[in-house]
Image: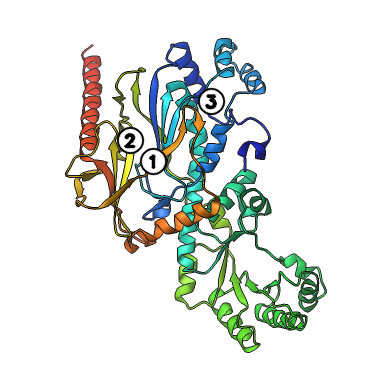
Amino acid sequence: MSVNKIYGHSLALLTDLYQLTMAHGYWKLGRIDEEAAFHLFFRTNAFGGGYTVAAGLAYVLDFLRNLRFEESDLAFLSTLTGNDGRALFDEGFLDHLRTLDFRFDMDAVPEGTVVFPHQPLLRVTGPLLQCQLLETPLLDMVNFQTLVATKAARVCAAADGDPVLEFGLRRAQGIDGALAASRAAYIGGCAATSNVLAGKLFGIPLRGTHAHSWVMSFDDERQAFGEYARVMPNNCVFLVDTYDTLDGVRHAIEAGRRLRERGVEMIGVRLDSGDLAYLSIEARRMLDDAGFESAAIVASNDLDEHIIESLKDQGAAVSMWGVGTKLATAYDQPALTGVYKLTALRHPGEDWQPKVKISEQTAKVSTPGVLQVRRYFQGSTFVADMTYDLDLGIEDDRVVVDPADSTRLKRVPRGLQSEDLLLPMVRDGQVIYEEPGIEEIRERARTQIRHLHPAVLRFMNPHEYPAGLERRLHELRTRLILEARGHSAAIAESAAAT
């Protein structure tokens, strides 16, 4: 898979204009050799849940492998003008982009890793201008796939082992949204997709049979099922609710008997409307009485994790779930709160100078430094995540401080196993990470979720997993916030005095 091949042209301009205007400014001020550290993170877990599943890294790495400004990109940029009618960008800057030698480093959590608010999913270090240019495309590729992978994981958890099929292509947000959603949904745990192009590009299993239009194109439902069984005998899931659902089940049984006479078994029936709990129970009884105990009952119709959980509680006899709109569009939360923030600067050969962004909103205050995340686990259960600064390291007493409430502390017991989550992905502009296949990524997500305490997995009021800052990093952050606010106050007092 190559995202450049999908779109057929350079993606260097997949960015916001202000990224290029800032890059132009860095170039014009002679700051192109100044080094920066940026971190990509999100502020709240998706869907009010207790965890989030990282996805989208494969798109990022493929984008970086092919990142360059082509002549058509530069020709377009040369046509842009400012409010005085003059060229927005100097020719010298465009020449710089033409020969730009990307030499940044990037570390990231592997796809399928469970992650939590305010901890970095990606760290980018290198020339300030280059790191700045990466902000928008990285957020674009990580935010949406992470959101959909998390939704898929929740839906699959509600299905409790039943296969979940992703049916969202027709309701997805355009071609790119549909492909990214199908890929992320599979990572999050879906068993298959209806999206044939996604199957080709990503190697995702495909599922699908017929729609209501097939039934309506014949004189009656019996004929429709019989003809479908004749032309597609090895792919028969009959959609039974075009007219009367339980009559549809009877007609599917008749078609199934004719298939059986030919030595072929029907796969099952699909319910797409009505009282899915009642209808599935009745359909199961009818299929079993007719000797089709192994026939599946597939349910669809605007499902999500909450509806599936409710149907399970009602004893629904559904064995497979088709989830479309609310999965592929992340229906109840259209965007992840992902951001990409500058956290440190330095001149080549000098020490990093940590930077912090302050805000009137506590959640929007950033974390300074060059950061890593260490995950502690006891046996097979994740215990806590600690974000720490690479220069400061970790104190022996290993205290995790909640970034939103400094009075909430967790001391990590000695003797626990641990691992650092951010792994080397790019060095000196070259991708060095050996990417796993999508099946391995999907299995990683499933395994990671199993390592969380069940209380973290609740849909309603999940337990808050301990994820915070190493104590010395918290102290650095607090000091820089106070210094920044003191500086702002001094400026305000001076302005008032004059």
Q: Which mark is residue 371?
A: 2
- The reply to whether residue 83 is visible in this rendering is no
**Disc 1 residue type (three-letter):** Leu
Dot 1 or dot 2: first in sequence order is 2
Q: Residues within 10 Å of mark 3 (few under 14, many from 20)?
A: few
Q: Quadrant of residue 293?
A: bottom right
- Horizontal side of 413 relative to 177 (left or right) equals left
Q: Earlier in the sequence, mark 1 or mark 3?
A: 3
Q: Alpha-carbon neighbours of circle 1 within 10 Å: few (<14), some, or many (≥20)?
A: some
Identity of the amino acid at label 3?
Answer: Leu
Quadrant containing the N terminus in the rendered view: top right
Name which residue lies at 55% across and 41% down.
59
* Amino acid type, mark 2: Leu
Dot in front, 1 or 2 = 1
How far is disc 1 from disc 3 in space, using C-alphas?
29 Å
- How far apart marks 3 and 2 lie (CA) works out to 28 Å
430, above or below 465, in the image = above
**Numbered badge on residue 422:** 1
Residue 244 at least partly seen: yes
Give the crowd class for mark 2: few <14, some 14-19, many >=20 residues within 10 Å: many
Image quarter where the C terminus lies is: top left
Among numbered discs 3 and 2, the one appearing first in the sequence? 3
Q: Which mark is residue 17?
A: 3
User: Is 55 left, or right, of 377 in this rendering?
Assistant: right
